[in-house]
Amino acid sequence: MTTTGADYYAIRVRGLLDSHWSGWFEGLTLTPLANGQTLIAGPIQDQAAVHGTLAKIRELGLQLLSVVCVE
């Protein structure tokens, strides 16, 4: 489930985001969880794009809980 040259990331934040934010997160899948967290997941091309995604999370004022590169 990865794009060529991209690693798959699973990022958890505190707070609920619905799927309309997916475009802002460049097509990553947003899954609201019952525990009040959102899982933001999908292939991210490189480290610059990872940092860009984290900057968007910061801009929304969401608390970052975890960032995992899934192998």
Image (tube, helix red, strand yellow):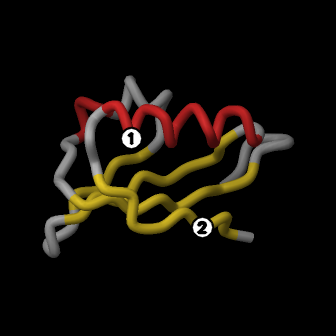
Q: Would you name the residue on which mark 1 appears?
A: 57
Tell me the quadrant of the picture where the N terminus can be found.
Answer: bottom right
- Locate residue 19, reporting x and y percent: 25, 39
Circle 1 — which element?
helix
Image x and y of residue 61, in percent:
26, 41
Q: Nearer the viewer, mark 2 or mark 1?
A: 1
Q: CA distance from mark 2 to mark 1?
A: 15 Å
In the image, residue 23 above or below residue 40:
above
Tag shown at residue 26: none
Q: Nearer the viewer, residue 32 or 62?
A: 62
Query: What is the three-letter code of the residue carrying label 1?
Result: Ile
Q: Earlier in the sequence, mark 2 or mark 1?
A: 1
Residue type beneath disc 2: Val
Q: Quadrant of residue 35?
A: bottom left
For label 2, the residue is 68
The answer to whether 70 is drawn above or below residue 57 in the figure is: below
